[in-house]
Image (cartoon, rainbow, N blue to C red):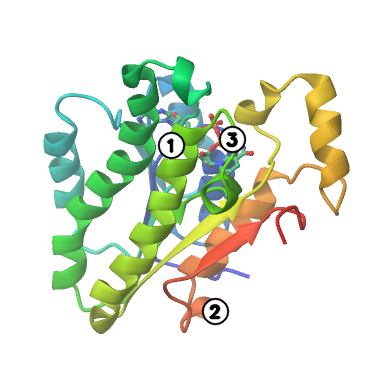
Amino acid sequence: MEMLRGKNILVTGGTRGIGKNIVECLSAAGAYVSFTYTQSEHEARKMEQTLENVKSYRLALNAEHVDQQLEEIAKEHRTLHGLVNNAGITNDGLMLLQSEANWMKVIDINLIGSYKVTKAFIPALLKQKEKASIVFMSSVAGCVGVAGQTNYSVAKSGLIAMAKSLSKELAPKRIRVNSVSPGYIESDMTDKLHPTLRETYKKNIPLQRFGQPEEVANVVQFLLSEQASYITGQNIIIDGGLIS
Ligand code: NAD
């Protein structure tokens, strides 16, 4: 079913993992999808050739000229029906032992990066007549906190708060804002985990497996679509029952 036929949607961090699955899912649902990438130009070009109606932009959220680049991308998108702030990183370590620069990098890319992207598009969203939906990629770390991930947990809980607050600011303009909080999802990010640790984590998940990126993409697609027309200010947890 083409739930998003003709809709213009921008996804950050679209060439791998969850972001790539979101781009594929939205393209299959009939949307025109713009996505950003940092270094994987080859993958971005491949996706442009193999998927319907997708276009890529090189954009590093912590680059010096990011505001200017975002302004240029926003100018090309007079009407935007959906924005998915997916790009993010981890940089783990105990707070006491981590340098401030290492700690802050995670805040800069996950939280400040998503803020900058969203802010760049708000003027266009306010001008257009059509409705829009914004989704922030949070994490269960932002809901419950994780040892060794104070930076990541702070950034991700900040995104939940950003979605809730912004949903109240933008609701009168018919713009919905939500966040999703995945648990352990198969991706480059979780591939880094030691096999023994993976098994321990799996035992704690009621559904007894890591999630697939498609299982996150499906929820994002739903939130962007008219099927979710009365949902705003929510954080949807996608974690196989881990923190329920
Ligand atoms: P991933 O590492 O495969 O993908 C991260 C994406 O972010 C990539 O596309 C990368 O290019 C982009 N990115 C990284 N640094 C960037 C920068 N400086 N500027 C712009 N883009 C940058 O990881 P993933 O698992 O696909 O993660 C996607 C999102 O989902 C992230 O926000 C992550 O925090 C979140 N998440 C992942 C999991 C999981 O288990 N994999 C769980 C909860 C939340």
Mark 3 or 2 closer to N-term? 3
> In the image, is the residue at mark 1 within 8 Å of ligand 1 by its beta carbon?
yes
Query: Which label number is shown at residue 13?
Result: 1
Q: Amino acid at mark 1?
A: Gly
Query: Sequence-wise, which precedes: disc 1 or disc 2?
Result: 1
In the displayed structure, 206 sits above or below 44; it is below
Dot 1: element: loop
Q: Nearer the viewer, residue 168 or 172?
A: 168
In terms of depth relative to the viewer, which is nearer, 75 or 204? 204
Residue 217 drawn above or below residue 201:
below
The circle drawn on residue 17 is 3
| Residue 63, quarter of picture | top left
Residue with the mark numbered 2: 227
| Residue 77 appears in the picture as rendered | no
Q: Residue at coordinates 15% horizontally, 38% vertically from top-left?
A: 67
Does mark 3 have its CB less than 8 Å from ligand 1? yes
Count neighbours of disc 1 (C-alpha within 10 A) and say few if under 14, some if 14 to 19, many if 20 or more: many
Tell me the CA gap for discs 3 and 1: 9 Å
Q: In which quadrant is the C terminus drawn?
A: bottom right
